[in-house]
Image (cartoon, rainbow, N blue to C red):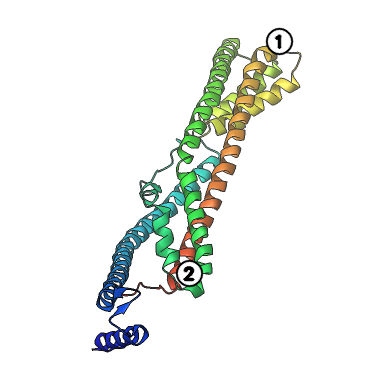
Amino acid sequence: MIICCSSQKYYQFFLDKAGSDKFLGISIDTIFTALITIGIFILGFWLNKKNDERKEYDLLIEVRSYFLQLLDILIESTKKQLEAFGDFINELKEEKENDYVIQSYSGFTTYDIDQIPNEKLFKIFVYYKLDSGKQDAIKLFKEMITKIGLIRNISGSWQKQFQDFLESWKRVDEEYNRNARLVEDFINKTVHLAHKAGDISNDDFLKRFDTIVLNWQKMDNHVDKFVMMKHLIEPLHKLCQETPKDTRTLDLVRPIMGCIYAFANKMKLNEVYIGLFTAYKTRLEEAKKGIKDSINAIEKLKDKKPGII
């Protein structure tokens, strides 16, 4: 009814202006029909646009739900990976030999998240927010993406770093073992001579040497490198320093120093990787917290849902 009334007014307007049923040589009926057609086309285009926006919004809601599920898995796996890094750091700090292993969690990866285009995430968490909160949404979105990127970098690099550690540790361990075997060979040879000699009370070097070896062999887990260093290698090193003129010192001091250097390199290696994985832990803690804080703040901002006709 409203359209009909409006049509009659426009029709009468053209008649009044033209004084006939034509306007600029074109039939008023033709002009009126064309205007109605254009109006219907524009209205249809607008309705289709709104429907497309609604469909896109509904799809983005599903993507958002999937993304948040992936984010929960990532955060939980990051928490577990942090604990694994902490266990490794504690093992490096312990003064005993360990078989170094770091548990790897399959969820500690951004692979599935990376399959979702950032453009879609931007629309979900920024574009469809009310204008009043859009600037906050942009800032929080950037923070979230940055922290996810940080986890991506660490999750993609820590295993290589750990493998490098194992390879380096193996090299210095082999160097230590090679020199330790020379020390043990010296011990077997010297102890044999001591037993053959019978009375060694007048041989200060041999007497002290025999006491050091016997005390070390009585230790629990005396083959552990930390125990060996503290109760055998270091006391023997002191003996060599205090008996520099004894010819046996020359044969003993070289493998002793080899053990000391190799062990020092192992401790330095441990120190370096304690620092590296502590840094990983700190950055992952920050990333985990940053993601949770950002997503919680974004979720509090109201959406601007597309209109529905």
**Residue depicted at 47% across the width and 53% down the height:** 148
Q: Residue 94 location, x and y as percent?
A: 54, 42
Which one is in front in this view, the residue at disc 1 or the one at disc 2?
2
Work out whether residue 141 or residue 219 is closer to the camera in this orientation and state it. Answer: 141
Give the residue type that dot 2 points to. Ala
Dot 2: within a 10 Å radius of its alpha carbon, few (fewer than 14), some, or many (20 or more) residues?
Answer: some
Q: Is residue 279 above or below residue 55?
A: above
Residue that badge 1 annotates: 247
Q: Earlier in the sequence, mark 1 or mark 2?
A: 1
Residue positioned 51% across, 63% down in the render: 138
Of residues 120 and 23, the one nearer the viewer is: 23
The image quadrant where one finds the C terminus is bottom left
**Vertical arrangement, residue 132 with respect to residue 290, above or below:** below
C-alpha gap between disc 1 and disc 2? 76 Å
Q: Which mark is residue 65?
A: none
The quarter of the picture where residue 201 lies is: top right
Q: Amino acid at mark 1?
A: Thr
Query: Is 268 displayed left or right of 114 in the figure?
Result: right
Numbered mark located on residue 297 in the image: 2
